[in-house]
Image: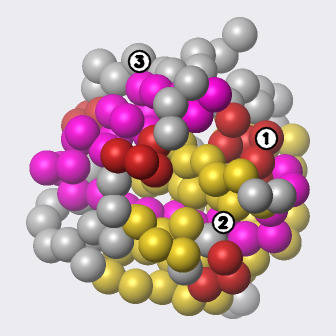
Amino acid sequence: MCMVTAVADGERAGCLVGFASQCSIHPLRFAVWLSKANRTYRVARAAQHLAVHLLTRDQRDLAELFGGETGDEVDKFARLDWGEGPEGTAVLTDAAAWFVGTILHRTDGGDHVGFVLDPVRSGEGRDGPLLRLSDAHGIDAGHPAE
């Protein structure tokens, strides 16, 4: 599991993402898939960069916030430590690791859109085992698929 943040046109958004993977070795590329139903997707459509964060298992509270609440109703960023990252992105200061990627392509996959990223900068922070899909079991989507 990872958390993705997007910033565009003066708006910030973020969501928990279950579909993400490295998709190329040379050149290095990574893809994250955002649900068309959530606010993060709407902000990411206008963004040039996304920030991708790994959380540790003891950060389930952040997974619940970013997976179980919608930015249409809650300012998620008011509840955590974050800072402006490279290219004007929003980076969580307490993440296990993060990277910022330039959006190269957007690919419609049905109810999700894939954002292919060219990683440009990364950082590390918190130690501990990483949050997995099984650790996020029971989090009801803040913006369930319609």
Residue 44 in percent (x, y) is at 76, 52
Q: Which residue is mark 1?
A: 42
Write down the residue under mark 2: 50
Residue at 55% across / 79% down in the picture?
85
Residue 82 placement: quadrant: bottom left
- Looking at the image, residue 71 sits to the left or right of residue 138; the answer is right
Q: Read off the residue under disc 3.
A: 140
State the extent of the magenta-drawn residues as a range. Answer: 45-72
Name which residue type carries label 3. Answer: Asp
Q: Are marks 2 and 1 in contact (CB under 8 Å)?
A: no
Amino acid beneath label 1? Arg
Tag 3, which secondary structure?
A: loop
Judge from the rendering whether residue 109 lies leftward or rightward of residue 87; answer left or right. right
Q: Secondary structure at mark 1?
A: helix
Q: Which mark is residue 115?
A: none
Determine whether label 3 and label 2 are within 8 Å by CB: no
Q: CA distance from mark 3 to mark 2?
A: 24 Å
Spatial separation of the CA atoms under disc 2 and disc 1: 13 Å
